[in-house]
Image (cartoon, rainbow, N blue to C red):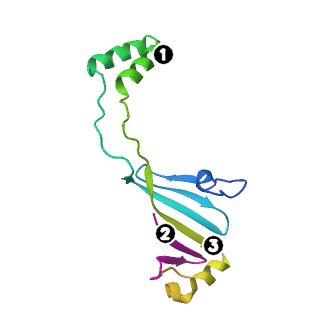
């Protein structure tokens, strides 16, 4: 797997062109170019919706058995119609994941100059966490976390 790489024709100019990353609980959308990159970080419990009951007209096992009979008989359209009608509840509340924060990364010679020895206290290009604005430096990169 070490030979596997993702290659793109150009930088992702914004969030809509970004690369989604995550495991279903913690995620990010990474976008930017060679000199600067932004990671818009989300977490599953940071949500704009609210809990609500999701009642369906399904009679449970009896309806599931009827759907299975249709699928096994090759009546896929009929089984799909039953599943849509009986198992998918009406949504009265729609929410979406919210951004926890944006992590902005700067790379190259400008990142070390921008970070400076005072921001992280490390002159040797090592890793350091700055006390002002949540800035961090590692090698030739600088990162700033901006609250969401």
Residue 110 is drawn in which quadrant?
A: bottom right
Residue at 63% in and 62% down: 32
Location of the C terminus (image quadrant): bottom left
Local crowd at mark 1 within 10 Å, few (<14), some, or many (≥20)?
A: few
Q: Which residue is mark 3?
A: 107
Residue at 30% in and 44% down: 51
Q: Give, as a single range, the part of the protein colored magenta.
A: 131-148
State left or right for residue 124 relative to residue 94. Answer: right
Residue at 50% in and 84% down: 120
The span from disc 1 to disc 3 (Cα, nearest Å) is 53 Å
Q: Which residue is mark 2?
A: 146
Rendering coords of residue 89 (x, y %): 35, 30
Task: Say which of marks 2 and 3 sits in front.
Answer: 2
Whichever of labels 2 and 1 marks the residue nearer the N terminus, that label is: 1
Q: Main secondary structure of the magenta part?
A: strand
Q: Which residue is mark 1?
A: 77
């Amino acid at each position: 797997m070490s030979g596997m790489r993702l290659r793109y024709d150009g930088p992702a100019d914004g969030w809509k062109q970004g690369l989604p990353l995550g495991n279903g609980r913690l995620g990010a959308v990474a976008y930017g170019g060679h000199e600067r990159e932004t990671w818009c970080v989300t977490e599953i419990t940071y949500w704009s919706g609210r809990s609500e009951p999701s009642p369906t007209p399904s009679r449970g096992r009896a309806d599931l058995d009827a759907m299975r009979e249709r699928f096994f008989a090759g009546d896929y359209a009929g089984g799909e119609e039953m599943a849509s009608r009986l198992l998918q509840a009406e949504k009265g509340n729609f929410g979406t994941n919210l951004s926890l924060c944006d992590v902005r990364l700067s790379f190259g010679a400008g990142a070390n100059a921008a970070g400076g020895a005072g921001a992280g206290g490390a002159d040797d290009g090592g890793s350091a966490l700055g006390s002002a604005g949540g800035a961090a430096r590692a090698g030739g990169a600088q990162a700033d976390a901006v609250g969401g």
